[in-house]
Amino acid sequence: MPSKTVKTTTAAAAVLALGLLASQPAIAANNTSDSQAFTFGVIGDIPYGDAEIAKFPSRIQDINGDSALKFVTHVGDIKNGSSVCSDEYFASIRSQFDTFEHPLVFTPGDNEWVDCHRTNNGAYNPLERLDRLREVFFDEPGKTLGATMPVKTQENLGLPENVRFTQNRVAFSVVNVQGSNNSLLPWSGLGETTPTPEQLAEVEHRTDAVLDQIRDTFTDAERRNDRAVVLMTQADMFDPSLLAAATANPETVSGFREIVAAIIEETSRFDRPVYLINGDSHVFAENQPLAEGSPWLEVYGQPAADDLQRITVDGSANATNYVRFTVVGNSSDGDDVLSWEKVPFSQ
């Protein structure tokens, strides 16, 4: 009898062992996936003009060829500032976006709605163009363009373009912050010399939503013990070409003031690396715009936030590359969670 018990136990152990062995590859794969480094790509202010529009399909195929990318973000401006903001153009870019083989996160830029009041843009009401952009590019809130990746959106607030998600203990938050002083410049193409009530209401609502998302991003990152936060916008809130004007008159960047204050407050509280990736100013840059001694601190009337690292991607005529970001493995903590390099397009 004891012998039989031993044999039964041995047999059961063998079955259990086989079951464990059968399940091990999946467990190992998940653990490996969680701990490995990963990469993502960022582009912005592309395509600008007929020549770049013609090259855009090739640019997308270059990015598709980088098979290791986890996702791609376009930080806005799908056209230049002197071309028509037509439905046909929006549809053509959407069809190109659909050819991305990676998940594509897109946040609108000022050229495709804020500045569409300009006569050479078609003298559109910018708010109508923003509504149309949301219909064309955000018709399935909670899903990325290209390959599907689930994201949390602010669809309930009417801003499906504001999304956030997490990858390997890094929190990503993509928000609709615009050039033209966050859309506060008058719609001169429509004959306006001051912001309209409707314009001001949109800016207030969108800014409040952005502030909510930024704060929620950091709160959740702290709760999860994330290693870093990555914020992405179209607007360059630290555009060097605006520094002289903003120093002389801080109202030049008044539309960004609350957002910058929130970023500083949350960055200081988080006390881990924070990365701000933007387009808008078209020239690649890597700096700490809110470090001690920065002139932007006086412009915005804020204390320093040394943990904030900004990366501006090339755009317009300089959009001859995408920026590939590498996130170190999940088990790695420290100040250098992200690294980046420019990857030239093939043509």
Image: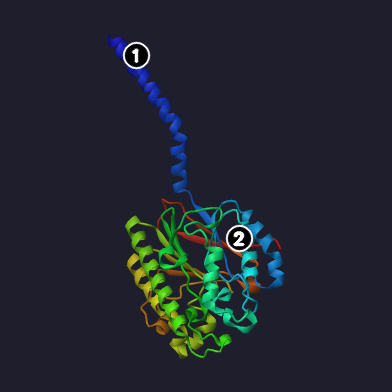
Residue 145 at least partly seen:
yes
The residue to which callout 2 is attached is 97
Q: Quadrant of residue 320 in the image?
A: bottom right
**Residue for point 44% across, 58% down:** 165
Residue 119 percent coordinates (x, y): 62, 84
Give the structural element (helix, strand or loop) at label 2.
helix
Q: Looking at the image, tell me whether mark 1 or mark 2 is earlier in sequence order.
A: 1
- Percent across and percent down for residue 18 are 43, 25
Name the mark nearer the viewer: 1 or 2: 2
Q: Amino acid at mark 2?
A: Phe
Dot 1 crowding, Cα within 10 Å, few <14, some 14–19, many 20+: few
Labelled disc at residue 138: none
Q: Position of residue 6 (x, y in %)?
A: 31, 14
Q: Secondary structure at mark 1?
A: helix
Residue 116 picture quarter: bottom right
- The residues bearing labels 1 and 2 have C-alpha atoms spaced at a distance of 62 Å
Total marks shown come to 2
Residue situated in front as seen by the camera: 203 or 169: 203
Residue 191 falls in which quadrant of the image?
Answer: bottom right
Q: Is residue 148 above or below residue 84?
A: above
Q: Where, quadrant-wise, is the C terminus in this rendering?
A: bottom right
Q: Is residue 293 above or below residue 142?
A: below
> Residue 330: percent from the left, percent from the top?
43, 51
Nearest the camera: 135 or 328?
135
**Residue underneath mark 1:** 7
Q: What amino acid is at disc 1?
A: Lys
Tell me if label 1 and label 2 are in contact, CB under 8 Å: no
Residue 136, above or below 147: below
